[in-house]
Image (spheres, rainbow, N blue to C red):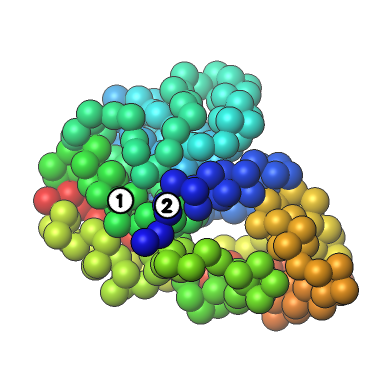
Amino acid sequence: MTDYQAVTQRQQVTWSTGDFNAIARKTMAMSERLIEAVDPHAGQRVLDVACGSGNAAIVAGRRDCEVTGIDYVPDLIERARMRATAEGLDIDFQVGDAQALPFEDASFDVVVSVLGVMFAPDQEKAASELLRVCRPGGTIGLVSWMPKDFGGDFFAAHARYAPPPPGVNPPVRWGTDAGLQELLGDGVSSIDSQERVTFGHFRSIDHTFDLHRTYFGPTIKAFETADAGAHADLRKDICDVFERYNRATDGTAVVEYKYLQTIAKRA
């Protein structure tokens, strides 16, 4: 039987390593598009689950929504608070676990997660929590990496050197129609998923790699886990993914991020 608590604790250490904000700011467009799609109006209650440094919460806050963001990495919550303060936004950022949200049933009109809840080890529990805290008729909006394209290839490159824990479903399950139906189907009246594309801009492929090697917890963890003799191969495999999805032709890197955007209506 999988010890989800132990896996969660290990993951929390991984995502606390480095500074995820340095990576998350490259995907801000995903949050902007998701909030536009779920279209929360001023005064509505919005929850950003596994909010990281606050991208989606901040976009919702700009609409004068009543926003709460929750993440299990305290440093990221502090960064989110700093960003909100800099914009003059009153957002309630809290430290907490997506698998045990500290909110009453039906507390929010809109619940969103951008590349966040998908990494919760106990996917069924995390999905049930999204449904529980969203009011009937409310909206759940998700951005997830898919098994194919950049996200699938990027995390597969890491998994060859730092295998995922046994008994835990792959995060990219959230990026499939079948997975979403299994996780949310009984609790929603509709699920609408669309593949979307955005781009991450970097000075070069080397710059892309160095940024992740320095700031992205899973990449840092992969190098800690892999034998030192495999580090060159790990670097090559990761750079190969960036190169595969690089759309620039001028020596810089414009990495194509394909992802699944999901809008579900709470039953």
Q: Nearer the viewer, mark 2 or mark 1?
A: 2
**Residue 205 vs residue 68: left or right?**
right
In the picture of the structure, the residue carrying the numbered disc 1 is 125
Label 2–label 1 contact, CB within 8 A: yes
Q: Amino acid at mark 1?
A: Lys
The x and y percentages for residue 15 are 61, 47
In this view of the protein, which residue sits in the foreground, 148 or 101?
101
Q: Which mark is residue 91?
A: none
**Residue 117 vs residue 141: left or right?**
right
Give the spatial CA distance, label 2 vs label 1.
Answer: 10 Å
Q: Quadrant of residue 153?
A: bottom right
In this view of the protein, which residue sits in the foreground, 198 or 79?
79
Residue sitting at x 52%, y 64%? 165
Q: Amino acid at mark 2?
A: Tyr
The x and y percentages for residue 216 are 70, 52
In the picture of the structure, the residue carrying the numbered disc 2 is 4
Residue sitting at x 27%, y 61%? 183
Helix, strand or loop at disc 1? helix
In this view of the protein, which residue sits in the foreground, 126 or 242?
126
Q: Quadrant of the N terminus?
A: bottom left
Residue sitting at x 23%, y 59%? 184
Residue sitting at x 46%, y 26%? 94
Q: Residues within 10 Å of mark 1 (few under 14, many from 20)?
A: some
**Residue 137 vs residue 253: left or right?**
left
**Residue 29 vs residue 162: left or right?**
left
Q: Which tag, 2 or 1, sits closer to the chain's start?
A: 2
Helix, strand or loop at disc 2? helix
Q: Is residue 243 visible?
A: no
- Image height of 264 relative to 44, above or below: below
